[in-house]
Image (tube, coloured by chain):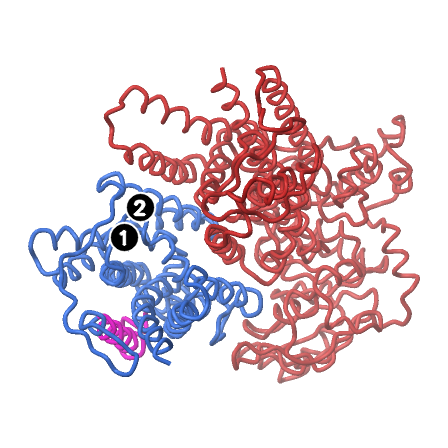
Amino acid sequence: MSLFLASVGFGLITSAVLAIASVGFTLQFAVTDVLNLAFAAVMTAGAFVAYWVNQAGVSVWIGLAAAMVACSVLSVLLNLAVYAPFQRRGTSPITLVIVSLGMALIIEFGIQAVVGGVNVSYSMGQGRTFRAGGLVLTTVQIVIIAISVAVMAAVHVLLRYSRLGKAMRATAANRTLARNCGIRASRVITITWAITGGLCGLAGAVFAIDIGSFGPTSDDLFLILILAAVFLGGPGDAYGAMIGALVIGLGTEVSAAYIQPDYKYVIAFVALLAMLALRPTGLLGARARG
Amino acid sequence: MFYLITLLIYGAVDVIACLGLSQQFGVAGVTNFGFIIFQAAGAYVAASLALPSDTANGGYQIYIGGLHLPFPMPLIGAALAGALLALPFTFLVGRRLRGDFAAIGLLVTAVLLNLLVTDYRPLFNGDAGVAQVPAPLQSGIFILSSTTYRWVFVAAVIVLAAGVYMFLRRITESPYGRTLRAMRDNDKVADSLGKNLVSLRTGVLVLGGAIAGLSGGVLVSFISVWSPAAWSYAETIVLFAAVIIGGAGNHRGAILGAILVPVGFEEVTRLITNSNPSLPPNLLPSLQWVAIGLLIVLFLWFRPQGVLPERKRLIAVPAPAAGREGEPPAGPAASAHDGQGLLTRGEAARARKGAAGGDDILQAVGLSRDFGGVQAVSGVTFTIRRATLTGLIGPNGAGKSTLLALLAGTDRPSAGTILYNGHDITALPAFRRARMGLVRTFQLASEFKRLTVMENLLSAAPGNRGDSFRGAVAGRRYWRGDEAAAIARATDILRRFGLDKLANDYAGDLSGGQRRLVEIMRALMAEPDVLLLDEPMAGVHPELARRIGDTLVGLCREGLTILMVEHELAIMDEFCDPVIVMAQGSLLAQGTMAQLRERTEVVEAYLVG
């Protein structure tokens, strides 16, 4: 039983980190129509920005904010300089995916060329340890979960109740129609890159805190988990991505406790392929996009 | 010397792999981000077949198999392994899934399979991988001992690469290859013209998988080791970079790309490392990946067609019928079509007609389609009589295009039944309906952009013997007759519509009106019994629209049935009888235009709409 609870603890933290990233990824795709495989590379950039801030003697929690700002700017630039010009030219979605893979290589290995291949970690305390039954969480882990819950609530408020959120949903549903209804689609898209870029940076730094020691290529596998969560929830569906993150996060960590930890990603893999085969529109399965 | 040999082997193996990828990605438009796992499967299976049982080596490495089979069994096994591995992925590349989603699925599969093989040691010795794989025709530990042997090996692999190239060229330049390229340009339209996308894509995955597997088998036979580090998902990106830079869709481009990218990069890195031994160890490999990323993005922006673009397939248009008499007929099938006009129907169409009974060729019963609560089509029932030109009108959003999609099988109804020649076809996919003679066109431009006008027409010709994998393998001599007949028929149609001068232009370069014509001509090439036209005259010069209308009326006299969506009432007046009126998803009225003008609700629907 305590094994189970302990693994649930790990699962909750993984889910929390995964949810921030997945919601960012899926919103990005929904509004901008870019299946951005450079997402994890941008996360890595965020993690290193937080690291440099942290190295300068500032708290890593301030570094978190710096990572958000940096990735927000990086994402907006990525769109303005690369994705938007390709889209204006009428490039097919699959070509854009290949472009994003190219950008992923450039960013990820650009970082590696600068920092070298060694792993680093933030200098920070883990805080007190809390136990409830077999569930063991540190203060830092609880803060991560709290941040994630706050982000989810903020995304919900943004999408449901704000003008911007409505404009984003309208642009996602039909860009041309939204434009004809007086929504400045290109501005909405730029703002979406800024917001989702911020989520990406936050996810990158939080993920780095969670795994403790990280390097330029640490996020490669995490991208697979993001994709699994996003596709499980239905690409473009923010609420689906939240549920997907919870399922994948808990699924991988709990299964790791019972089968060999090496195979924990199999759950994510099987979930993703099953969804693609049976229900490409995701668990909530509302609408097929595109 | 040994270095040169190694370089040549790696180069030839990369060429083979890039050719396989070029066939999948460049020709058929199947983006296989998991390409490397097929190479890996081939390498592991070849190793497992060539190695002796793992109990014989003192247990320092474990693996399944170990059959110790002689050459060429390991290589055959490698190709088979790649082909078989493709089968489970068939579901990913079916009709329903977007191409980019399928690509993501394959990417994820590649990453996780690598992880699994790394962690699960009993399969292929885990992280360390298998070693001491015997080379072909050698035994014991004296592997690759003589220089002569190595050179023979190099020559054999280069011959093999040349063979793969010749084989793929034979496939790509056949009618089957043309179908693959049509599918690449627009899969939905290919489906509506009777092409079975699932089977075509499965074929592409299996063939590419076999070629990738073969390349892996050859490589492991030479380097004698194989481990997960050799096939990380990033290796696929290198191969993609090679194919994109060389020229997707052009097999020579793939060869060039293989030499420029994987081989060239290794060489440059080695030279720089040798001359600057003081560089940090991680810097060059990192920069190498950055450069590959940059090359992909820059090429896709500045030269998406690659260094060697796909070349245009020019097809000589036969001289007009009068001048053709002196020439020998190209084949038995061709002579059967000679002297007959545009409306010549193939054997298939005639056979279908013989089997069909009754005057009601197409019936819809209670047909409905809702999109998340919105009833686009609700409870529509009507009958189309044989050899009529029926018009379908209604205001915007009346559900006309949706109805057409339901009839053609592009979309599935939520409720209701569709009868064609008395048979229930509701459950049949679009390509099957097209093969039965129920063919549609699309409202938006849907030409195969990177096929010439002539190729667009030829791609729709049914019953070409070369339009299958086996037919393509059998070679030009096997399908030459059918091809000549199709060219003759396409030429007749082109002349009828006055587009024969543009036969060898890319369809994507034509004007909007000309593209509409290409689409109608292509649908006619499919030898339909029922033609479903979605606004065929939108954006066409009025004079040309009249000519199209006259042609369609003529076709109906000869027995063709047409259902045509059109906005222009004048066109309905002139050509269509009867006319069906739709509004808000329902059938409002049916009759001649004169009858319909009497009915107030019809007039109102139009005025309101």
Q: Is residue B316 visible?
A: yes
Magenta residue check for B528: no
Q: What stretch of residues is rendered in magenta? A: A144-167
In the rendering, what colour is chain A?
A: blue
Magenta residue check for A166: yes
Residue at 33% in and 66% down: A18
Distance of label 1 from label 2 (alpha carbons)? 7 Å
Viewer-closest of B136 and A30: B136
Residue at 15% in and 73% down: A128
Viewer-closest of B159 and A39: B159
Q: Is residue B543 visible?
A: no
Q: Position of residue A230 (x, y in %)?
A: 42, 66
Q: Position of residue B3 (x, y in %)?
A: 47, 20
Residue situated furthest front in the rendering: B58
Residue at 40% in and 35% down: B302
Relative height, residue A91 to residue B279 (above, below): below
Relative height, residue A112 to residue A193 (above, below): above
Look at label 2 and name its amino acid. Glu
Q: Badge 2 sits on which subunit?
A: A
Q: Earlier in the sequence, mark 1 or mark 2?
A: 1
User: Where is mark 2, residue-wise?
Assistant: A108
Q: Position of residue A192 (x, y in %)?
A: 29, 62
Chain assigned red: B
Tell me, yes or no, whether the two marked residues, 1 and 2, touch with CB atoms within 8 Å: yes
Viewer-closest of B383 and A247: A247
The image quarter containing residue A14 is: bottom left
What secondary structure is marked by label 1? helix
Instruction: Decide whether the magenta segment is chiefly helix, strand or loop.
Output: helix
User: Where is mark 1, residue-wise?
Assistant: A44
Q: Position of residue B408 (x, y in %)?
A: 70, 65
